[in-house]
Structure formats: C-alpha cells, structure tokens
Image: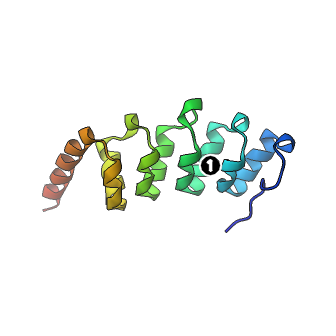
C-alpha cells in the first residue's frame, strides 16, 4: 500500500497544487483533498488509480463524468452502485454483472429487461 501524502497535513496548509501532486502519487488521497480543490482531472486520476475512488467523486459539483463511471465499472463491477442512474445503460450494467453478479442489485428495473435481451442476443451470436 502506497503512503498517503496528505495524511496529517492540516486543511489550512493544503494547496490545490499540493493536492494534485498527492493524488498523482496515490489516487486514494482524493478523500483527503478539500472539496474546493477537487478538479475533474484529479478525480479521473484517482478513479484510474483505484476504481473504488468513484465513491468519493460527487456529481453535485459536476466533477463526475460518464468516462469515469465506465472506467470504474470495467475494473470493478460493484462500482455500478456509485454510477448515477442516467449513465446506467444496459451495456454498462451488463459489463458490471459480468464482472460481479452481485452488481445485479444496482441495475435499475427498467434497464434489466434491456440488459437481459442484450445478453440473450449475445449468447445466440456466439452459438
């Protein structure tokens, strides 16, 4: 496990540049970055480092992107839980369930039907 570069540094001493450099070295430091310093670039770096960092990226500030969600789900299907409904497409949900069947509980009901049809079609094409 990489060491944290922000742990123990008081909020008042943190700068935007310092936080970006820390996240580049250890994406898990995103949770220690003050909201006012978070950028979309920083969040993308953190999600690429560890898909579970998607939970720390808040959509309210407009930092979360569809790309981040796709990257996270492709690495860890259970991250679908942190994807806003508007981006839970049948394709992304199917990817999540293929990764981890437990992700099925995060698939919206309306998407399940489309996803099942897509899965059946894919199976037929392989046979």
> How would you rate the neighbour count of disc 1 (Cα within 10 Å): few for under 14, some for 14-19, many for 20 or more?
many
- Work out whether 35 lies above or below 103: above
Q: Which residue is mark 1?
A: 45
Q: Secondary structure at mark 1?
A: helix
Q: Position of residue 37 (x, y in %)?
A: 73, 37
Q: Residue furthest right?
A: 13
* Count of numbered tags: 1
Q: Position of residue 23 (x, y in %)?
A: 70, 51
Q: Position of residue 96 (x, y in %)?
A: 36, 54
Q: Residue at x 72, y 34 (%)?
A: 36
Residue 125: quadrant of the picture: bottom left
Q: Residue furthest bottom?
A: 1
Q: Residue at x 41, y 49 (%)?
A: 80
Q: Residue furthest top?
A: 61
Q: Quadrant of the N terminus?
A: bottom right
Give 25 or 6, whichever is nearer the viewer: 6
Relative side of 32 to 77, left or right: right
Relative side of 124 to 85, left or right: left
Q: Position of residue 68 (x, y in %)?
A: 51, 44
Relative side of 12 to 69, left or right: right
Residue 17: quadrant of the picture: top right
- Work out whether 31 lies above or below 12: below
| Color theme of the render | rainbow
Q: Residue at x 48, y 42 (%)?
A: 67
Q: Quadrant of the C terminus?
A: bottom left
- Work out whether 49 lies above or below 19: below
């Amino acid at each position: 496990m990489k060491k944290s570069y922000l742990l123990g540094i008081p909020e008042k001493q943190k700068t935007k540049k310092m936080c970006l450099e820390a996240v580049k070295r250890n994406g898990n430091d995103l949770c220690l970055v003050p909201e006012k310093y978070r950028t979309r670039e920083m969040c993308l770096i953190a999600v690429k480092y560890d898909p579970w960092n998607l939970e720390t990226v808040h959509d309210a500030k407009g930092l979360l992107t569809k790309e981040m969600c796709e990257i996270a789900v492709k690495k860890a299907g259970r991250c679908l839980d942190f994807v806003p409904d508007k981006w839970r497409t049948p394709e992304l949900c199917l990817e999540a369930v293929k990764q981890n069947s437990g992700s099925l509980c995060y698939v919206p009901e309306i998407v399940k039907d489309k996803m099942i049809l897509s899965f059946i079609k894919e199976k037929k094409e392989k046979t």
